[in-house]
Amino acid sequence: MRPNIAMLADFDTTKRPRPHRMIAALRDVARLFVIAREASPEVGAQCFSFPAPESNAQTRTKEQNERIKALCDRGEFAPLIYTKERAQIPALLDSLPKLDLIIVEDIALLPFACDYKEKHTCKILVDLREFYPLEYEDKQWLEGLGKLFAHLCERYLPKADGCLCVSAPIAARYLQDFGIASILYYSLPPYHNLTPSETSAPIRLIYHGLISQERGSTNLLELAKELGQGYEIYCQVLSNRSDFLAQFIAQAAPIPNCHILPPVSLEEIIPSCNGFDIGIISLQDTSFNNKNAMPNKLFEYIQSRLCVVATPLDSIREFFAHYEVGITSSDFSASSLAHAVRSLSSAQIMAYKVRAHSYAKELSLESNAKRARQIVRDLLG
């Protein structure tokens, strides 16, 4: 009999690669239910939606921020966990067939899984997509919501039966700070039957994904200026901050070799990038989570059969030592990233693209699905 598995997510899972791909990995071996904020339909899963909060980090008033800090200072975290928007989650969980496993994609929703587990016998698997107590590292956040996330880790993570983690250094930090061991699990995209495109002239670079001030994304604009003639950089970008996105697009406009592309769906990213030469990862080491990230775009670039050029994040350097699909710059500056790009001849770029092709099946959802299913089998006994 197929197990009943529910996923809890504080976002639309169709717009986030890790949960979306986990659903794809398990839908043929389990009855899947998704309870998510502003949920969209997922193939192979029954989906339930709860509303987004009325305000967020961008729109909160000074009074709302002061209330959050006061609650965190007093250790009164329940009002921040059990919000009115999430009030229907317990009833939704209880309405489902008895669950064998709850997969928690956001630690803020872990208390709901723990509450269900107290009433019913089930297992909990938490996906640690980052080191949550350092989601942001500015003083205001650390003294406010940072305390909430530390509380969630201290009180609720020990109640989980298993944890997945995005990178080895982040897994090590959870073990060090909270005594929580986790399984390294990459977010691998579906296999695409593509071949590497011939290297272009001029050489075409692509960056796709989120941009933000915290990620140091204006580095992409400086990279375009540094590279100049002979290189075209295309930015297929979106942002959680509309003002930052508008500013980025405005600053890109006068740069002749920098082009803005409209975002595409998750399913379209890989084929749409196949015609490029180099996939760029420009993430800065400005925070613990940035420094130790394994970005989804790394694996999407590989599946697109691109050469990858990245800033020297430790996790990516270690990955490149095993999978020779690209190079890292010597430091995090745009000039260093440009130097790394210019150091590659057309033949070398093509060689990296061919290597990416050789790893495409190994580094795919189809390969990863076997691991996901085994992890679930081991948890459920």
Image: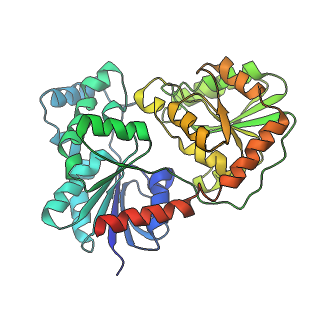
Query: Front-most of 107 and 369?
Result: 369
Tell me if I can see residue 279 in this picture. Answer: yes
Say left or right for 337 vs 98.
right
Q: In what quadrant of the picture does the N terminus appear?
A: bottom left
Where is residue 268 drawn, in percent x and y? 65, 54
Considering every residue shown, the one lying at the far front of the view is 322
Where is residue 319 drawn, in percent x and y? 56, 40
Query: Front-most of 214 and 125?
Result: 125
Tell me if I can see residue 41 in this picture. Answer: no
Query: Front-most of 48 and 317?
Result: 317
Which quadrant of the figure has residue 4? Answer: bottom left
Q: Residue at 59% across / 54% down in the picture?
A: 363
Say left or right for 336 vs 185.
right
Determine whether 377 is above or below 341 in the image: below
Considering every residue shown, the one lying at the far right of the view is 201
Determine whether 156 is above or below 224 in the image: below
Q: Residue at 44% across / 53% down in the picture?
A: 12
Where is residue 69 drawn, in percent x and y? 21, 26
Considering every residue shown, the one lying at the far bottom of the view is 1
Q: Residue at 20% across / 40% down in the picture?
A: 154
Where is residue 168 drawn, in percent x and y? 42, 41
